[in-house]
Amino acid sequence: MLTESLMLMKNELLLVLTLFIILVAKIAESETGDLESRNNRLMAWVNGLLVANLLVCFVPVAEGVLFGDMFVHNDLRQVQKGILLLGTVVVCFTNAAWIRTHKHANEFYILLLTTLLGMYLMISSNNLLMFYLGLEMGTIPLAALANFDLDRKRSSEAAMKMIMMSAFASCILLLGLSFVYGLTGTLSMELLSVTFGTTPMHVFALVLVVAGFGFKISAVPFHLWTADVYEGAPSGITAYLSVVSKGAVLFVMTSVLYNAFPQMEPVWYQLLFILAVATMVIGNLFALRQTNIKRMLAFSSIAQVGFILVGMSAASPAGASTVNYFVLIYLFSNLGAFAVVSIISAATGREQISDYNGLYKSNPWLTWVMAISLFSLAGIPPAAGFFAKFFLLLAGAARDNWPLLIVAALNMVVALYYYLVVIKAMFTGTTDQPMPAIKEGAFPMAGMVVCLAGVLLAGLYGGVFEYISNLIL
C-alpha cells in the first residue's frame, strides 16, 4: 500500500529530492574558487537530475487517489506533468550562459523547481482548495525569479508588478471559491459537478473563478501586467512564464470547467467567447506596435491564449484534447523563439527587434531556429503550429460558432504580419551595428534541437494528438 502511494506521487517526490540535493549543494559549496566553474558543475548536476526526472515520467503507474480523493493521478495528468517538466528542462538548457555567470544559481534552481512542484500539485488536485494551494506555491516564487536580474531596475519593477497583480488575481479567485463553498458546502470537483446550481449567485461565483483564471493566463482584460513583466524579467523566466506557468493553469482551467462546472457550460461558454475574441484582437493589435522582441512575444502569447480559449469553448473531449495538444506544440515553438532571445540577450544585452537586422549573416543557426519557431507560432505548414491551430478551430467548429472562427482566422493573418517582420529583419535587414557571431554551448544547442524536433515532427506525426485524445476519451 505504501509503495503504491509513493508511486502515485513519484513525480512530486523526485522533484522534492532534486530540491533537497540542490539545497545541500548550496550549504556545502565553498565561496572560494571560480564562479563559472562552480556553476558549471551545478548545471551539469541539476540538468542531469531533471532529465532523469523526465525519463521517470515514462514509467507507467496505475491510476489512484490520495488524501481523501484530494490528489488524483492518472495517465493524462502524468502527460501534463511531463510536458511542464520538458519545458523546464528546455528553459534550463537554453539559459545556461546566463545561469553560468549568476552568483545565485542555486537559489534560481530552488525557486524554479518549487514553482514546478506547485504546478504538479495543482494538476493532480481533485479539490479546489488543494488547487488553490498549488497555484500559490507555483506563483509566489515566480515574483522572486522575475527580479533575478539584480542589477536592473526593470527587473525589480517586473517583480513588483507581478506580485501585486498576482495577489489581486488570487483574491478574486479565492473570493469566487468562497462563494462556491458557501453555496454548495464542498470544494470537491466530483461533488460540485452534481451540486452546483444555476442561480444568479452561482453564476456570480463562476464569473469570479473564471476571472481569477483570466489573470493567470493573461487573458484580456486581465493582461495589463504581462508585457512589463515579460520585458523586465530575465529572458529564461519570461520563457518559463509564457509556456510552463501558463500551460499549467490552462490544463487546470480546462479540468475545472469541464469536471466541476459541467452544468454551467452555457454560462462559461459565453464567458470564454468574450475572452477569446478580446484576447485575440487586443493581443495581436498590441503586438503589431512593439519594437522590443520580448514585448512582442509577450503580446503574441496573449493572442495565443485567445486561440486556446476557442478550443476550450468546445466543451467536449475534442476540445480538451486540442488544448493539451496545443500547449505541447506551443511549448516547442515559443521556447524555441525564446531560446534565441535568451542566448542573444546573455551575450550582447540587445533585445530590440532592430537589433536582429542581418542576424543571418553572423548567426545562421540562431536565425533558422527563430524563423521556424515563429512560423510555427503563426500556424504556417508544415510546422506543428499549423496542425495545433487547425485542431483548435476544428473543435470550435463542432459548435457551429462561425463568428468566433472567423475572428480567429482573421487574427491568424494579423499575427503572421508581425512574425514576418522579425523574419524579414533577420534575413534581409541591414544595420550599422551587426550582431556579433555568438557561440552556443552544448546545453543551449541541445535545448534548441529539442524545440526544432518538436516543431517539425510533432505535427507530421499524428500519433501525438491521437495518444492525447485517447487519454481523454
Image (cartoon, grey):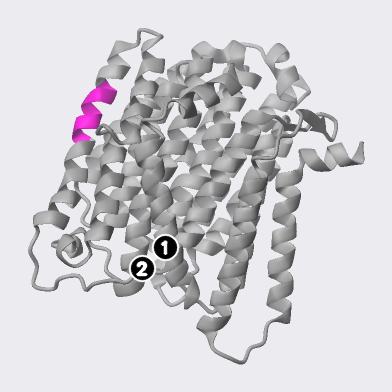
- State which quarter of the image contains the C terminus: top right
Q: Nearer the viewer, residue 244 or 257?
A: 244
- State which quarter of the image contains the N terminus: top right
Label 1 packing within 10 angstroms: few (<14), some (14-19), many (20+): many
Q: Residue 348's spot in the image, x, y percent?
A: 29, 73
What's the magenta region? Answer: 407-414
Q: Residue 271's spot in the image, x, y percent?
A: 45, 22
Residue found at the very far top of the displayed protein: 400
Callout 1–callout 2 Cβ contact below 8 Å? yes
68 relative to 114, above or below: above
Q: Is residue 375 magenta?
A: no
Q: Which mark is residue 440?
A: 2
Q: Is residue 379 left or right of residue 289?
A: right
Q: Nearer the viewer, residue 189 or 82?
A: 82
Main SS of the magenta part reads helix
Q: Which mark is residue 444?
A: 1
Q: Which residue is drawn at the image coordinates 51% and 46% (left, top)? A: 244
Residue 305 occupies quadrant: top left
Q: Is residue 191 left or right of residue 321?
A: right
Disc 1 from disc 2: Cα separation: 6 Å
Circle 2: element type: loop
Kindly tell me whether residue 219 is visible in this rendering: no
In the rendered structure, which amino acid carries the disc numbered 2?
Answer: Glu
Residue 113 occupies quadrant: bottom right
